[in-house]
Every structure is written in structure tokens, then in C-alpha cells.
Image (cartoon, rainbow, N blue to C red):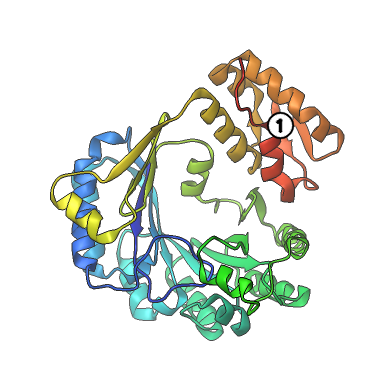
């Protein structure tokens, strides 16, 4: 089984915190869709087995129209094997999800929406420079539920001036809407973003890690009480609503990334496309793949497995480490984990090393402590 990721590099406006690749000009949208389809044809042999998941990410994929979607799905059907009931997700912004747009999406093969709500409060949305307002956030979800059962929303915590009560209200609103999947992220300050510049100039307060940790603990408590399972650090799903696409990434399954800046993984090699729309379109038109590739070493694979595994409820399997990397790696990871087990940040669950509730907010740091630079 494998996944297909399609990057749609267009947005109506730039969010202040975002460092993803996108353009606010839609002038080349048709050319870009043509290039996406051609890249799929050029690379169809790279991915093994049938597609289990198809994911439209961005950017803002909800800017695609019915004809764009039809063209992309026809290309997929003509050149890839797809399982009988694939998970097909489209990321969407609330301001795009009018009832007419939802009807178009529901009439397509898309069966899951991931909606970038981020907050139900106007002041938060203005700080982030989101294209939608609080009323649109609420209204689009009420509409979307009439057409889709499998819906995820994104929420951001740890923002400057976000009070504890406002974060509580955000979570209460999401739970009241009966949305079955929530992805929630701490606001991070990425280099060369508008947010970084605003903080440097004193226009916006710096991000406070202590506040983010407190909000994360509130998030865990609210989600657990509402019947969600925290199956990955930032992801919470009701039973039957875990993201198949995201789970595939975290468990090391292969995926093919199509479009400018998209990444791919085949088990041994990572590759990524150029992050420039005109150069991407020109290269694909000339039957050239604008790709860089990196072959992963055994150490790279081990470190990535530890990093992703510790973020999930499935943890890190000692049996898998010994089978894939050797006994030295198993011995090493157990030795490194021991002090964190004694501090109740990690625990052994049969053959798996798993992060405790106490250790969850520290999971990336814990993983780095289990990394190796070289093991002879």
C-alpha cells in the first residue's frame, strides 16, 4: 500500500506564520494542474503497490474547481492502481467552503475534508492573517457536516495573548460541533515569516513555550474527556477516524509527492521537487523532473523511525529495531531510554518504548536523546 500527495501551491493571501511554498497569484493555475498530471505520468513507476490514500495539500487545494479535480482524478485512474475504498482528503479553507463548493466536492471522489479553522476567535484569525473570519469558520463546519462525515479541523494554540479561557472555548466549540478528528499545533515562529519580523519589531509578543505547554495539557484533558484518542502528538481522532494518510507517514509507508516542493519517500530514498512554480512548470513541460534525491543511511532510517514512533501511540518497537537495524541498535536504544523510563517520561509496553502522558510535550526532545550519530 502507498500514498499519493498532491501539492496545490496557491493561496488567496499569506498567513503570517506560514513557511510552506505557495503563490498568491492564480494566473498559472491551469498550467500547474497540467504539470501535476504530467508529473504523475512521468513518475508512475516510482511507487509500489496500490494507492491507499490520496491527499490534496497546500497551499489551498479548495481553490481547485470541478474541472481541475476531474482532470487530476482521470490521470490517477489512467496510471495508478487504487484500492477499492481509498481515503481521499482535501485541505480546505473556511472561506472557500460555500454550499455550492461543498456540493462540487461531495460530487467528486473526495471523502474527507481537512479544514484550516485555526481558531473560532476573530482576534486570533487577524493576528494570523487568515482569509476567513470567525463566523465563516463556524458556518462552514455546519454546512460541511451536511455533505461529509469524515472531517478534520486544525486548531492552533500557544498564540500571543491567547488566554487559557479562550483556548478552552476554542476546544469546547470544536467538541460541540461533533467533529471526529482534530489536529492541533503550537504556534511556531518560522524563519523569514511575517510573524518572525513582527516579533523582532515588537509588534507581536514572543511565543512563550510555557504557555504552549499549558495549552497542550488542556488540549489532552479536553480531548480525552470528549472520547478522542491522541494517536499522534498533534492529532486526535474518534474511533474509526484516524487519518490513514498521516498514519502512513508516521509508520514509514511509501508515498509519492507531486507538485512544487512536494516530498516523496520509497523506503530508502527521499526526494523533493523544486519550490518554484514557473521553473517547475517549465521543467515538467520539457519532460524533466526538477527533483533532488537523498539516499538514507541505516542511521538516518533508525533516527527517523525513533522520531516518528515516539510521537505516536504505537511507540518504538524493539523487535523492529533489531530486525531492521541490528542488535547493537536495540541495545543502544534501551540504554538511552532507561533514564527517561526512570523519570516516567517513557515506559516499556511489552516490546515497545512509548511516551507517557507526562512526557508527551517533550517527545521530540526525548527522541533526539535516542538518536545516534554513528554506531560502530
Residue beneath the point at 55% across and 26% down: 299
Q: Say which quarter of the image contains residue 279.
A: bottom left
Q: Position of residue 224 (x, y in %)?
A: 73, 57
Q: Name the element at disc 1.
A: strand
351 w.r.t. 194: above or below: above
Q: Position of residue 282 (x, y in %)?
A: 18, 55
77 w.r.t. 373: above or below: below
Query: In this rendering, does residue 74 appear at all?
Result: no
Relative side of 274 to 286, left or right? right
Q: Position of residue 63 (x, y in %)?
A: 33, 71
Mark 1 surroundings: few (<14), some (14-19) or many (≥20) residues within 10 A: many
62 w.r.t. 241: above or below: below
Q: Say which quarter of the image contains residue 327.
A: top right
Front residue of 88/252: it is: 252
In the displayed orientation, state which residue is furthest to the front: 201
Q: Say which quarter of the image contains residue 156.
A: bottom right
Q: Position of residue 102 (x, y in %)?
A: 37, 73
Question: Which residue position is annotated with label 1?
Answer: 353
Residue beneath the point at 30% across and 63% down: 108
Front residue of 240/74: it is: 74
Residue beneath the point at 78% across and 47% down: 357
Count every numbered label the image shows and give the total. 1
Amino acid at each position: 500500500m502507498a500514498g499519493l500527495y498532491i501539492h496545490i501551491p496557491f493561496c488567496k493571501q499569506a498567513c503570517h506564520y506560514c513557511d510552506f511554498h505557495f503563490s498568491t497569484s492564480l494566473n498559472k493555475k491551469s498550467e500547474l494542474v497540467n504539470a501535476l498530471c504530467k508529473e504523475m505520468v512521468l513518475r508512475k513507476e516510482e511507487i509500489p503497490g496500490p494507492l491507499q490514500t490520496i491527499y490534496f495539500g497546500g497551499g489551498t487545494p479548495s481553490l481547485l474547481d470541478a474541472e481541475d479535480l476531474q482532470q487530476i482524478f482521470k490521470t490517477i485512474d489512467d496510471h495508478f492502481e487504487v484500492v477499492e475504498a481509498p481515503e481521499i482528503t482535501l485541505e480546505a479553507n473556511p472561506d472557500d467552503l460555500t454550499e455550492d463548493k461543498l456540493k462540487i466536492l461531495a460530487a467528486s471522489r473526495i471523502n474527507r475534508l481537512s479544514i484550516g479553522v485555526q481558531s473560532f476567535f476573530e482576534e486570533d484569525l487577524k493576528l494570523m492573517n487568515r482569509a476567513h473570519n470567525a463566523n465563516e469558520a463556524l458556518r462552514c463546519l455546519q454546512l460541511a457536516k451536511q455533505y461529509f462525515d469524515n472531517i478534520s479541523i486544525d486548531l492552533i494554540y500557544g498564540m500571543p495573548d491567547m488566554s487559557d479561557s479562550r483556548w478552552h472555548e476554542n476546544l469546547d466549540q470544536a467538541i460541540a460541533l461533533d467533529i471526529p478528528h482534530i489536529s492541533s499545533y503550537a504556534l511556531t515562529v518560522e524563519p523569514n515569516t511575517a510573524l518572525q519580523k513582527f516579533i523582532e519589531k515588537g509588534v507581536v509578543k514572543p511565543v512563550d513555550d510555557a504557555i504552549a505547554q499549558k495549552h497542550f495539557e488542556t488540549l489532552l484533558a479536553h480531548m480525552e474527556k470528549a472520547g478522542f484518542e491522541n494517536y499522534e502528538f498533534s492529532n486526535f481522532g474518534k474511533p474509526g477516524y484516524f487519518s490513514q494518510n498521516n498514519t502512513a507517514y508516521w509508520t514509514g509507508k511509501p508515498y509519492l509527492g507531486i507538485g512544487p516542493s512536494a516530498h516523496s519517500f520509497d523506503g530508502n530514498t527521499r526526494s523533493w521537487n523544486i519550490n518554484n512554480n514557473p521553473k517547475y512548470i517549465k521543467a515538467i513541460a520539457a519532460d524533466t523532473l526538477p527533483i533532488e534525491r537523498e539516499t538514507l543511511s541505516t542511521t538516518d532510517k533508525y533516527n527517523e523511525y525513533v522520531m516518528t514512533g515516539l510521537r505516536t501511540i504505537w511507540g518504538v518497537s524493539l523487535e523492529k529495531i533489531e530486525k531492521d537495524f541490528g542488535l547493537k541498535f536495540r541495545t543502544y536504544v534501551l540504554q538511552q531510554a532507561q533514564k527517561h523510563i526512570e523519570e516516567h517520561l517513557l515506559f516499556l509496553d511489552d516490546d515497545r518504548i512509548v511516551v507517557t502522558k507526562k512526557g508527551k510535550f517533550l517527545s521530540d526532545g526525548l527522541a533526539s536523546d535516542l538518536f545516534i550519530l554513528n554506531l560502530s
